[in-house]
Amino acid sequence: MKTIALRRGRAIVPMLLLLGACQEILRPEEVMDRIERSVTLPDGAAPLSAYDRSYAFSGPGRIKAIYVRAADRSAAGKRSWLADPAKLPLGFESGCRQVTVLYDVTVDRFLYVACTGLA
């Protein structure tokens, strides 16, 4: 059994994953790093570093991320882990100014990566 514990606010929330006989504890920073190392942004998207990135659990074993193109490019690249997925940025930006990512940590794969609006 694999154990992943992610921080929600100041508390650590454990999440058990049936992925093998070993135990692994991942912090939010490690999960964000894992996602960012392997995500392929859609055609038309800017480089990852141009987006502010917010992450939250969206269901058992699933993480939703919203990447929003920063207005101030010199300050772009901030990232945060939110305890409540309802607090993820909600925008109606056109084109790839916003990218939505859905990732399943139990199988280590992306379920959805797409630009939010139309170009």
Image (spheres, rainbow, N blue to C red):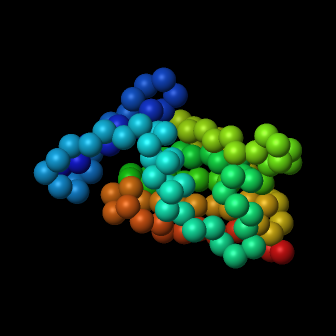
Q: Is residue 53 above or below residue 83?
A: below
| Residue 91 coordinates in the image, percent (x, y) | 78, 54
Front residue of 29 and 5: 29
Q: Residue at x 49, y 48 (%)?
A: 33
Q: Is residue 106 left or right of residue 58?
A: left
| Residue 86 coordinates in the image, percent (x, y) | 62, 44
Q: Residue at x 57, y 38 (%)?
A: 82
Tell me the quarter of the picture where residue 23 sits. top left
Q: Residue at x 22, y 54 (%)?
A: 18
Q: Is residue 82 above or below residue 39?
A: above
Q: Is residue 100 left or right of residue 95?
A: left
| Residue 66 coordinates in the image, percent (x, y) | 65, 53
Tell me the quarter of the picture where residue 43 sits. bottom right
Front residue of 102 and 45: 45
Q: Is residue 117 visible?
A: no
Q: Is residue 67 above or below residue 30?
A: below
Q: Is residue 57 visible?
A: yes
Q: Residue at x 63, y 41 (%)?
A: 79
Q: Quadrant of the C terminus?
A: bottom right
Q: Is residue 55 left or right of residue 95?
A: left
